[in-house]
Image (spheres, rainbow, N blue to C red):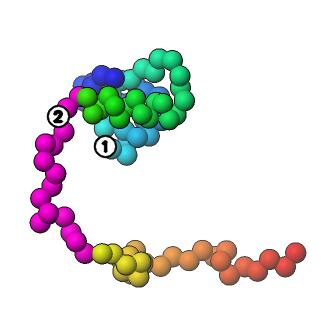
Amino acid sequence: MKKQPKGYGLHCHRAIITICKLMGIQDMYCKVDGSVNLMNVTRALFNGLAKQGGARAEPEPDDLISDRRLHWADVRVKQGSKRSHWATVKHTI
């Protein structure tokens, strides 16, 4: 696993590409030797990232973390309820 210059992209196994996109990593080269079992590849990625260091030493302060619970009704109001047209179709076969 190697960090690459900006604009290089992700040249890795498909599972690693998916995880890196979710984590916000944009430029990395990675080669998988041996087993390409998805569980092993994922475990190796997280082990490698943990050994690199550079992570925050302390977690976020509690005052930055919202303690408000979200309810489904609030989320639905913010997003707008979008029903499927197929929800009202009855199967008469």
The location of residue 63, given as percent across then percent down, is 11, 66
The dot on residue 62 is: none
Q: How many marks?
A: 2
Please name the residue shown 52% across and 34% down the image.
38
Give residue 9's quadrant in the image: top left
Helix, strand or loop for the magenta stretch, by majority: loop
Callout 1: SS:
loop
> Is 50 situated left or right of 59 in this image?
right
Give residue 91's quadrant in the image: bottom right
Please name the residue shown 50% across and 35% down the image.
39
* Residue pointed to by mark 2: 54
The location of residue 44, given as percent across then percent down, is 40, 29
Q: Residues within 10 Å of mark 2 (few under 14, many from 20)?
A: few
Give the amino acid at mark 1. Gly
> Is 76 situated left or right of 38 in this image?
left
The location of residue 85, given as percent across then percent down, is 63, 76
Question: Which residue is outermost to the top?
Answer: 33
Please name the residue shown 16% across and 51% down the image.
59
Give residue 24's quadrant in the image: top left
Q: Is the C terminus in the top left, top right, bottom left or bottom right quadrant?
A: bottom right
* Residue pointed to by mark 1: 24
Q: Residues within 10 Å of mark 1 (few under 14, many from 20)?
A: few
Q: Which residues are magenta?
A: 52-68
Q: Is residue 61 magenta?
A: yes
Q: Check the image and report above or below for 89 versus 12.
A: below
Please name the residue shown 37% across and 38% down the image.
20
> Is 17 situated left or right of 49 in this image?
right
Q: Earlier in the sequence, mark 2 or mark 1?
A: 1
